[in-house]
Image (spheres, rainbow, N blue to C red):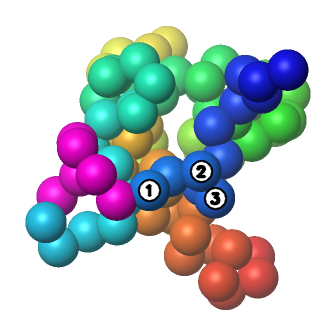
Amino acid sequence: MESDTLSAATVQQGEGYTNDCAYPLTDPRTGRAAYSVADVARIMGIGSPAAYELFHRADFPAIWTSPRRVCVPVQAFYRWLNETACMGA
């Protein structure tokens, strides 16, 4: 059974990437350029409340489009995930 989640480990160099960056510009499965709170929760295997906490962190690259709508660019999300994992935070 194929997993429904996409982890940073499954991201590979190829179409949809910048030449100088190992992080995708768009989601390899959907082609979308940004993730919602629900997307981040699914990818990370956490609940929506924990995902909302991430979006409120100062170091998380969230983009608030209105007081109630927020997203994170795919490339910024994977960069943040890698940097956070490397720092052990």
Q: Which residue is mark 1?
A: 12
Residue 40 seen by the camera: yes
Residue 10 is labelled as 2
Q: Is residue 6 left or right of residue 36?
A: right
How would you rate the neighbour count of disc 2 (Cα within 10 Å): few for under 14, some for 14-19, many for 20 or more?
few
Q: Secondary structure at mark 3?
A: helix
Which region of the structure is painted magenta?
A: 13-18
> In the shown orientation, is residue 86 left or right of residue 50?
left
Q: Are marks 1 and 2 in contact (CB under 8 Å)?
A: yes
Identified by mark 3, the residue type is Ala
At label 2, which amino acid type do we have? Thr
Q: Is 46 placed above or below 11 here?
A: above
Residue type at tag 1 = Gln
Question: Residue at the front extreme?
Answer: 1
Tell me the quadrant of the picture where the C terminus can be found. Answer: bottom right
Q: Secondary structure at mark 1?
A: loop
Rendering coords of residue 35 (x, y %): 47, 28
